[in-house]
Image (cartoon, rainbow, N blue to C red):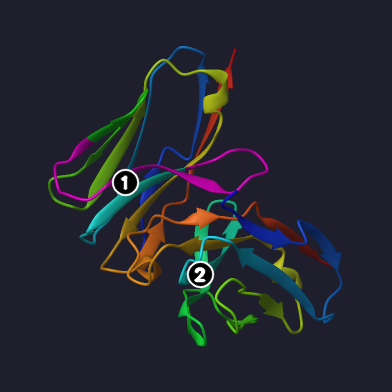
Amino acid sequence: GQQLNQSPQSMFIQEGEDVSMNCTSSSIFNTWLWYKQDPGEGPVLLIALYKAGELTSNGRLTAQFGITRKDSFLNISASIPSDVGIYFCAGQLGWGAQKLVFGQGTRLTINP
Amino acid sequence: EAQVTQNPRYLITVTGKKLTVTCSQNMNHEYMSWYRQDPGLGLRQIYYSMNVEVTDKGDVPEGYKVSRKEKRNFPLILESPSPNQTSLYFCASSFSRGGTGELFFGEGSRLTVL
């Protein structure tokens, strides 16, 4: 299947620091999405991006859809303890949720 | 409350003993899907369903079966589980067959096959 390369695989930061993670692919995607998985729960959608170049914010989270349509990044500003979890990027190759491809995930750990 | 409900949440079984993981959603979603999550591999799609009686294989369908007899339910069946099916399983649904990738996930079912 298609591959998304998500990095870093894990991050250990201090509370209050900013966080940046990204996803790249050799394929062109129509949509990029970012999900967060809290410990013991299912992933929850954070941000969805639908146009190349689009920059979208959701509180302290900012995500961008790369101009080439082959990459996306997610930034978290001023991290807090509840930001702990696994963040997944997902790219949609065409129309239809069945065409969603997930990255390997970035595990975020925060030291208080 | 809108939700996707999976059962069981945790299960330990033995090789070859058939099991079913149930999934039910109360949002009247047409699209439903099963994923497995393994360390370093992210979420991989097992099977999906665009509507009642319409199912198709995802990226890792071997060893699994599904059925979609009702819109709200999408059970995952392991006819003869093997240790390599030890994983964390998620059911997800979406509001339309087309789907924009905005999936609603269940809380997960952790399966261990001995």
- Give the residue displayed 37% in from the left and 58% down from the top: B101
Q: In this view, does B49 lie above or below A37?
A: below
Q: In which quarter of the image is residue B20?
A: bottom right
Residue B68: x percent and y percent? 58, 82
Q: Give, as a three-letter code, the residue at label 2.
A: Met
The stretch of residues the image draws in magenta is A36-55
- Give the residue displayed 27% in from the left and 43% down from the top: A72
Q: Name the residue under label 1.
A: A48
Query: Can you say which quadrant of the picture contains the N terminus of chain A?
Result: bottom left
In this rendering, does residue B41 appear at all? no
Element marked by disc 1: strand
Residue A99: x percent and y percent? 35, 68
Was residue A100 drawn as part of the magenta stretch in this picture?
A: no
Q: Give, as a three-letter code, the residue at label 1.
A: Ala
In this rendering, does residue B40 appear at all? yes
Q: In the displayed structure, does residue A101 sit left or right of residue B83? A: left
- Give the residue displayed 80% in from the left and 81% down from the top: B18
Q: Which disc number belongs to residue B38? A: none
Element marked by disc 2: strand
Chain designation of label 1: A
Q: Name the residue under label 2.
A: B32
Query: Can you say which quadrant of the picture contains the C terminus of chain A?
Result: top right
Residue B17: x percent and y percent? 85, 80
Q: In the displayed structure, does residue B93 sit left or right of residue A49? A: right
